[in-house]
Amino acid sequence: MLTAVYGSLEAGLIYAIMALGVYLSFRILDFPDLTVDGSFVTGAAVAAVMIIDGAHPVMATIAGMIVGFLAGILTGILHSYGKINPLLSGILMMIALYSINLRIMGKSNVSLLQEETLFSKLADALAPIDQAVKSVISFSPTTWSVIISMVLLVAFLKLILDYFLKTEIGLAIRAVGDNEEMIKSFSANTNFLKVLGLGLSNGLVALSGALVAQYNGFSDANMGIGMIVIGLASVIIGEAIVGSKTIVRATLAVIIGAVIYRFIVAFAFRFNFFETGDIKLITACIVILALIIPRYFEKRREKKRKLVRKRGEQVASAKTHS
């Protein structure tokens, strides 16, 4: 049980970076970007191939993020300058990336089990901390390096994203998602803002893909299928539980949602409710429930508010007539 909890926390923190990217495109830009399914693999493929070729894992991870950023920019160009429908531009880029990813890897699957990855290097660097934790917590897992490093990285990325979205250009990107016509009236270059926003979104997604490849020990051409749905599940679950009134709260909600999603999936498999091939079904069900349940309770709250207002009006009317 503890192993499942530990693994879910690790995976949740890694996938939280991908969820932040989906939040940026889906919530901030109001753009249904299916490029995510391809750019996630692109980050993994670039990082895996570079590590095998002898590159340092940090440089390989950054390179994967940059290539994902470029993929997002191309999607933005297709939509903003090519005037292609947002959904279609994402689909076209996702399809193109499948072939590009195969070209990068040279085959459908690349193993990293015999290679030095970012996490293996972190495990060596944080070995003293692991020993200190184990001396205090008797049931400590093999290593805390993944959790420690990912908590720091996710917190750093969250703070950077929070700060960026409060800058002048960040506010402009948010305005494009809220009301594009209004921001155009201020002579803002909405095309550039969309391209930049989609580039940043897919850069985060590709960074997550590069980390997942090193965490799992392989990169696969099909590992990105359904990533957009997993990202949406994380966003919706987090917003339903934590809320999204401010940017700081919304990004925190996305991170918490990604971790909770991984816990739900882990426990579903732990108690043998589903088979391994049912992961996409579980994801779809989680998203459906996360969309329907909050709306149901909101309708109930609205009915109660209307009833309270009606009773108040009746009481006020009775006092007036008396």
Image: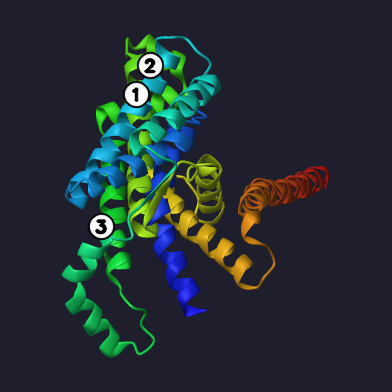
Check disc 1 and report its element: helix, strand or loop. helix
Check disc 2 and report its element: helix, strand or loop. helix
**Residue 52 position in % (x across, y down):** 25, 49
Task: Please tell me in which quadrant of the rendered image residue 313 appears.
Answer: top right
Under mark 3, the amino acid is Thr
Please tell me whether mark 2 or mark 3 is closer to you in this view: 3
Under mark 1, the amino acid is Ile
Relative vertical location of residue 208 with respect to residue 261 in this rendering, above or below: above
Q: Is residue 246 visible?
A: no
Q: CA distance from mark 1 to mark 3?
A: 28 Å
Residue at x 50%, y 22% (from the top left corner): 92
Task: Please tell me in which quadrant of the rendered image residue 172 appears.
Answer: top left
- Looking at the image, which is closer to me, 200 or 215? 215
Residue at x 26%, y 34% (from the top left corner): 66
Of pointers 2 and 3, the one earlier in the residue sequence: 2
Residue at x 29%, y 60% (from the top left corner): 114
Residue at x 38%, y 46% (from the top left corner): 209
Residue farthest front in this picture: 107
Q: Which mark is residue 117?
A: 3
**Residue 154 position in % (x across, y down):** 31, 54
Check disc 3 and report its element: helix, strand or loop. loop
- The answer to whether marks 2 and 1 mark residues whose Cβ atoms lie closer than 8 Å is yes
- Looking at the image, which is closer to me, 232 or 8? 8
**Residue 169 position in % (x across, y down):** 27, 26
Q: CA distance from mark 2 to mark 3?
A: 34 Å
**Residue 88 position in % (x across, y down):** 54, 20
Q: CA distance from mark 2 to mark 1?
A: 6 Å
Mark 2, residue position: 77
Mark 1, residue position: 73
Of pointers 1 and 3, the one earlier in the residue sequence: 1
